[in-house]
């Protein structure tokens, strides 16, 4: 499949001399090195929910296309009213309704029954609400106070013909589909879904429900990461699990490169005896191993794996502990994958909210605490910071971010809180 762009060989490289990489430096370097790699295809607008626009959407038709009534009432020319603004007009036979125009002009001194959404006929520039009138002997009367143009929607007042209604890179939501339909667009150009492969590594891992020995660990990362990729709007590709075998790992990466646009792995990202991911990528592709100054997380292997047609397939090597894998994905991998998919760099803004916890931290790394809002709207944190405590991820509905500097948090202090919903989860 043709791709618009491939990544440079040094897209993950850090400046010389960098040891522990601050989070902001790592994010800035990732942002600089990423570029869209997804192809472009047309899609029916009605079926494009969750897709990323590859080109802006322009209105093929104004909304509304013609002036129409905003209420049920009576249409008239404001100049027909008396000097005091009161109305005493002849009521015409017939009416204007949505989808059933009146079809002729309304003469001066007359009024016409008109219903919400009906096209305003010639001669009408104002509408009086039905609750404000009295009808007697074919005459329509109401008190002073009606303003010129009252209760009338102007043609194109929402969107003019030819106006840009949605920008490229936007992930389409249900309200966006309503707008696209309203302006007469039936087909949009979207990026093909980024195909993200998910691979687990480690001799200790086994499928959920199959562990029979104390040294075996159920593979929690792969189902979590597959679900996260899907939640981000990508196509999840299950690349399975490999043991601590360099040859098997290379084969799995080769197979993934033939099917995917990017690969996310867990385990083997550090420099231990059995951390083969870094060694395999270094031997057969290009590797940058970052020690990111964050907790949990820290070891992050970023690599490029050779793929078909001379492409460089990005590989994000995450830590093996599930909490660290999850948080590294949210903080580091998600915005980078968004750029690859054509959606631009995405980082949550967060909210500054009162803390319902106490904490003292050392300088030198950014910390992310599993957190949720309590009934008072304050942020409480999980009782343990252990990166193997998966129950804390299910307990939380977001993260608290503590800055790199040393500091203390007391109840009531403002902390930055990111809802999981801001990450798309």
Image (cartoon, rainbow, N blue to C red):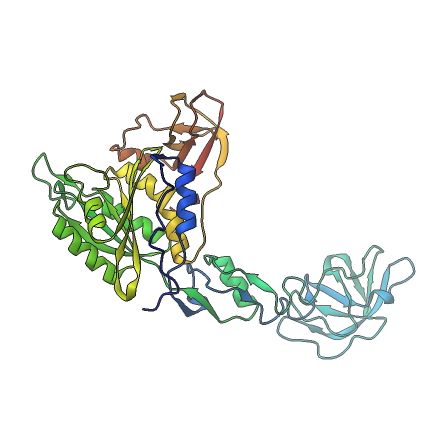
Confirm whether residue 24 shows in the render: yes
Query: Residue pushed farthest left?
Result: 213
Query: Residue pushed farthest bottom?
Result: 104
Residue 142 picture location, percent across and down: 82, 59
Confirm whether residue 424 shows in the render: no
The vertical placement of 273 against 381, above or below, is: below
Residue drawn at (83%, 54%), measured in percent from left and top? 145
Residue drawn at (19%, 59%), measured in percent from left and top? 255
The vertical placement of 95 against 424, above or below, is: below
The vertical placement of 70 against 230, above or below, is: below
Residue 284 picture location, percent across and down: 21, 53
- In the rendered image, the quadrant that contains the N terminus is bottom left
Residue 276 picture location, percent across and down: 17, 44
The vertical placement of 285 against 100, above or below, is: above
Query: Residue pushed farthest right?
Result: 83
Give the camera-side residue of 50 and 86: 50
Residue 262, by quadrant, is: bottom left
Left or right, 282 with reference to 99: left
Residue drawn at (49%, 22%), measured in percent from left and top? 412
Give the camera-side residue of 81 and 369: 369
Residue 176 picture location, percent across and down: 51, 60
Residue 205, by quadrant, is: top left
Left or right, 371 with reference to 119: left
């Amino acid at each position: 499949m043709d791709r618009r762009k491939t990544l440079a060989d040094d897209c993950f490289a850090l400046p010389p001399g960098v040891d522990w990489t601050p989070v902001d430096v790592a994010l800035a370097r990732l942002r600089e090195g990423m570029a869209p790699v997804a192809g472009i295809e047309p899609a029916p607008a009605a079926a494009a929910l969750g897709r990323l626009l590859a080109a802006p959407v322009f209105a093929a038709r104004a909304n509304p296309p013609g002036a129409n009534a905003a209420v049920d009432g009576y249409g008239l020319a404001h100049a027909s009213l008396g000097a005091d603004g009161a109305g005493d007009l002849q009521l015409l036979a017939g009416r204007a309704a949505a989808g059933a125009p009146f079809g002729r002009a309304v003469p001066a001194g007359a009024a016409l029954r008109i219903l919400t959404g009906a096209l305003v006929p010639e001669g009408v520039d104002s509408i009086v609400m039905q609750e404000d009138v009295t009808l007697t002997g074919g005459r329509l009367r109401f008190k002073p106070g009606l303003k010129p143009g009252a209760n009338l929607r102007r043609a194109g007042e929402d969107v003019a013909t030819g106006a840009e209604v949605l920008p490229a890179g936007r992930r389409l939501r249900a309200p966006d589909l309503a707008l696209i339909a309203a302006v007469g667009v039936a087909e949009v150009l979207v990026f093909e879904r980024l195909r993200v492969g998910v691979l687990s590594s480690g001799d200790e891992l086994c499928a959920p429900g199959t562990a029979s020995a104390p040294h075996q660990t159920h593979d929690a990362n792969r189902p979590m990461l597959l679900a996260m990729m899907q939640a981000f709007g990508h196509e999840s590709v299950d690349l399975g699990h490999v043991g601590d075998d360099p040859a098997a790992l290379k084969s799995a990466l080769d197979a993934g490169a033939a099917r995917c646009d990017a690969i996310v792995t867990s385990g083997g990202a550090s420099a231990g005896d059995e951390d083969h991911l870094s060694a395999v990528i270094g031997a057969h592709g290009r590797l940058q191993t970052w020690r990111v100054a964050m907790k949990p997380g820290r070891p992050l292997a970023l690599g490029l794996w050779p793929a078909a047609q001379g492409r460089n397939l990005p590989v994000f090597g995450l830590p093996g502990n599930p909490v660290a894998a999850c948080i590294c994905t949210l903080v580091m991998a998600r915005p980078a994958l968004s750029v690859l998919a054509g959606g631009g760099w995405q980082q949550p803004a967060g909210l500054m909210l009162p803390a319902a916890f106490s904490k003292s931290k050392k300088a030198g790394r950014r910390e992310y605490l599993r957190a949720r809002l309590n009934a008072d709207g304050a942020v409480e944190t999980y009782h343990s910071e252990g990166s193997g405590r998966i129950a804390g991820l299910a307990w939380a509905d977001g993260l608290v971010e503590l800055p790199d500097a040393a500091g203390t948090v007391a109840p009531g202090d403002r902390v930055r809180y990111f809802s999981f919903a801001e990450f798309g989860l």
